Image: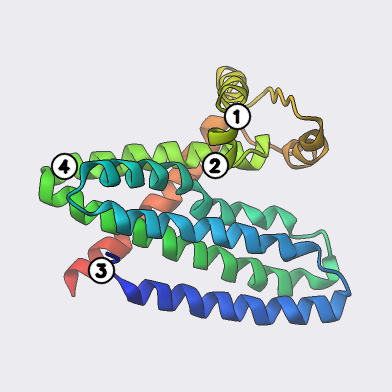
Amino acid sequence: MLHHPHHIRAFTLFCLFWAILSVIRVCITGTTEYMGFVWNLILALLPYFFAGFAVQKNWILHYGNVFLWFIFFPNSLYLWTDFVHLGEHPEMLHFDIVYISVMAIAGIICGFASLEILHTYWNQKFHKKITWTLVSLSMIFWIYGVYIGRFLRLNSWDLIDSPLLVLREIWMMTITNGGSLIITESHRIAEATRYSAGMTSLSTFLILYFSLFMIFYVSLYHIRRAR
């Protein structure tokens, strides 16, 4: 059962706004090049449903949904890295800032809402210090997943479809601190090279985004609890 349906309303509102902006953008530019973001939004929504269905007594359904929630959660944070597309069309710069921001906010609404559902559930099972440790460690892994998605051009489906390939490429990236991208699928090489041209190191990426998202989450979590 989903605990916070108002999150869906907020997500829907941002998606409608994004859809209106998408139509305007297509009319102005005459292209549909950014419509692939629709898939990103769908992936960002999935963790919310997995988290909602994970809070139940049946242990098989619980752990199954927790696992799916865990591996799909990075998609909610990944949308913030789509700002790399800024500057591709200088004449649309400020439009695209708003356009991508709306999508990124929609993603974080679903991501943090799903995390809050599981966080509340963990508070009922463990000491609060343990739950915050779980949240912090999970956040590190998720940001790691965002890095993999942006620079290795992998997504959550690849972990299920080709686990050995994913593990090999992740291992090579980790031992070189992001300095070496060993990509074996030719159709991803050009795109990965494009985004890794100005790539920061793995450790720097983790520190920056961990700080950003933990500040966001902790602030929102305590604001809601203070009401």
Q: Are marks 1 and 2 in contact (CB under 8 Å)?
A: no
**Mark 2 and mark 4: span between their CA atoms?**
29 Å
Q: Determine which quarter of the picture holds residue 152.
A: top right
Q: Residue 162 carries which label?
A: 1
Which residue is at a point 60% across and 29% down the rendered structure image?
162
**Mark 3 and mark 4: span between their CA atoms?**
18 Å
Which x, y percent locates residue 126?
12, 43
Q: Identify the residue under disc 3.
A: 223
Crowd band around label 1 with a 10 angstrom C-alpha radius: few (<14), some (14–19), many (20+): few
Q: Earlier in the sequence, mark 2 or mark 3?
A: 2
The answer to whether one can see residue 61 in this image is yes
127 and 162: which one is in front? 162
Q: Are marks 2 and 4 in contact (CB under 8 Å)?
A: no
Q: Identify the residue under disc 2.
A: 156
Q: Which kind of residue does numbered mark 3 sit on?
A: Ile
Which x, y percent locates residue 105?
51, 67
Q: Which kind of residue does numbered mark 1 sit on?
A: Ser
Q: Do the residues labelled 2 and 3 touch (CB within 8 Å)?
A: no
The C terminus, quarter of image: bottom left
Crowd band around label 4 with a 10 angstrom C-alpha radius: few (<14), some (14–19), many (20+): few
**Mark 4 element type:** helix
Q: Which of marks 1 and 2 is nearer the N terminus?
A: 2
Mark nearer the viewer, 1 or 2: 1
Q: Which kind of residue does numbered mark 2 sit on?
A: Ser
Q: Earlier in the sequence, mark 3 or mark 1?
A: 1
